[in-house]
Image (tube, helix red, strand yellow):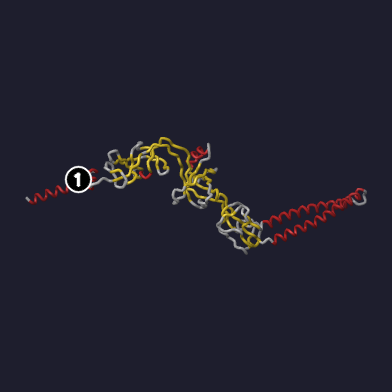
């Protein structure tokens, strides 16, 4: 009798353990309902934005090189600081170039004196040639000599102008206002000016206000951007990763004239003011272009959406606190919200916190955790 009762109790226990557990039973066994935070499905007008990864470039950049060969005497700027257009950056020893200028001036004086004498000779022998006291060939020789000296005087003036230019090149000035980089040449070094790529760079000047944003756009987005850019210049927004929510606004400056056949991408440029110097050449940034507005659009917080094997999904909560898993179709994400094109209705509530462990049909408690 005891054996029979024991077997009966064991069979009942095993049956109870292996029986399926409903959501209501799970809730009651723990003594409290899972707590979730919800947000409504909102119907509103949404700005249509296209987002890309961009790279910051200087608006203008110049590798400063010597235009004459000589020894560097000194520099006149502080590395890493702003310089103004026309500010002297380097001095090259001017003495050889001043000597060349002085020599050219002396040559000019000599040839001017010779030209004066040659012209007097032409006047003197013109009447003699007319009266046939000298041959026409002799007279033509005087004229030719005067003409040659006139050309020589013009060449001397050109030599003086060139010598002055080279002397001025001994002072190397900033071509535009910008920020100087690291100084690459020390005083006492000989710099060459062959006009080739092997000539040493003295310093690099970058103009960073305004500043340029380079980014590549897929071919499929080109016509949408061009169509939106025709009535007025499109605005762009730039954010720097890991820099909080700081936003920089500018305009679309350039759409390149060709698509790269190897990548299917087209280069574009944005122009942004950068008076405080917060954007720096070489930085990678997020670029957003607003191309229009989509009205009567359903949106939910992006945090509510998860990705499963069958696509994106989320959980809704009914008025009596029962959950339901919904497969949805999504569009673009804008400012922390995502457009939902299928699977939801305006006014429904979706779970934005507490999704872990949720299943359809569970009773939940709505409120802050």
Q: Position of residue 216 (x, y in %)?
A: 49, 46
> In this picture, is 73 found above or below 313?
below
Relative to residue 301, is residue 125 drawn left or right? right
Location of residue 37 by image quarter: top left
Q: How many labels does the image show?
A: 1
Within-10-Å neighbours for mark 1: few <14, some 14–19, many 20+:
few
Q: Which residue lies furthest to the left in this view?
A: 1
Q: Nearer the viewer, residue 25 or 365?
A: 365
- Give the camera-side residue of 11 and 240: 240
Q: In this view, does 86 lie to the left or right of 231?
A: right
Looking at the rendered structure, the secondary structure element under dot 1 is loop
- Residue at left 14%, top 50%? 10
Q: Is residue 5 above or below residue 226?
A: below
Q: Can residue 154 be seen in this view?
A: yes
Report the residue at 49% width, 43% height from top: 236
List the residue tagged with mark 1. 19
Question: What residue lies at 55% left-to-right and 57% top-to-bottom?
Answer: 80
Q: Residue 34: x, y in percent?
A: 28, 46
């Amino acid at each position: 009798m005891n054996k029979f009762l024991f077997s009966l109790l064991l069979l009942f226990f095993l049956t109870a353990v292996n029986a399926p557990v409903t959501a209501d039973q799970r809730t009651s066994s723990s003594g409290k309902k899972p707590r979730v935070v919800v947000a409504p499905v909102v119907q509103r007008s949404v700005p249509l934005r296209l987002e890309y990864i961009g790279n910051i470039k200087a608006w203008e950049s110049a590798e400063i090189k010597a235009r004459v060969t000589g020894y560097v005497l000194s520099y006149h700027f502080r590395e890493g600081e702003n310089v103004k257009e026309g500010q002297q950056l380097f001095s090259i020893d001017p003495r050889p170039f001043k000597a060349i200028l002085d020599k050219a001036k002396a040559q000019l004086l000599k040839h001017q004196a010779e030209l004066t004498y040659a012209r007097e000779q032409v006047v003197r022998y013109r009447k003699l040639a007319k009266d046939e006291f000298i041959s026409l060939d002799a007279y033509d020789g005087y004229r030719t000599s005067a003409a040659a000296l006139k050309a020589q005087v013009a060449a001397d003036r050109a030599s003086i102008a060139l010598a002055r230019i080279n002397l001025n090149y001994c002072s190397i000035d900033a071509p535009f206002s910008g920020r100087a980089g690291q100084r690459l040449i020390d005083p006492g070094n000989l710099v060459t000016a062959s006009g080739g790529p092997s000539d040493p760079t003295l310093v690099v000047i970058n103009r960073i206000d305004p500043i340029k944003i380079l980014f590549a756009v897929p071919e499929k987005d080109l016509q949408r951007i061009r169509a939106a850019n025709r009535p007025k210049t499109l605005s762009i927004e730039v954010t720097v990763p890991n820099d909080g929510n700081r936003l920089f606004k500018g305009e679309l400056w350039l759409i390149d004239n060709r698509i790269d056949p190897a990548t299917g991408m087209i280069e574009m440029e944005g122009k942004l003011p950068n008076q405080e110097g917060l954007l720096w050449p070489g930085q990678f940034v997020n670029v957003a272009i607003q191309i229009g507005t989509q009205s009567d659009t359903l949106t939910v917080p992006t945090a509510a959406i998860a990705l499963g094997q069958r696509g994106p999904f989320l959980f809704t909560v009914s008025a009596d606190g029962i959950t339901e898993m919904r497969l949805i179709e999504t569009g673009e994400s804008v400012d922390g919200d995502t457009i939902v094109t299928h699977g939801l209705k305006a006014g429904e509530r979706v779970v934005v916190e507490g999704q872990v462990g949720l299943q359809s049909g569970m009773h939940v408690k709505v409120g802050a955790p």
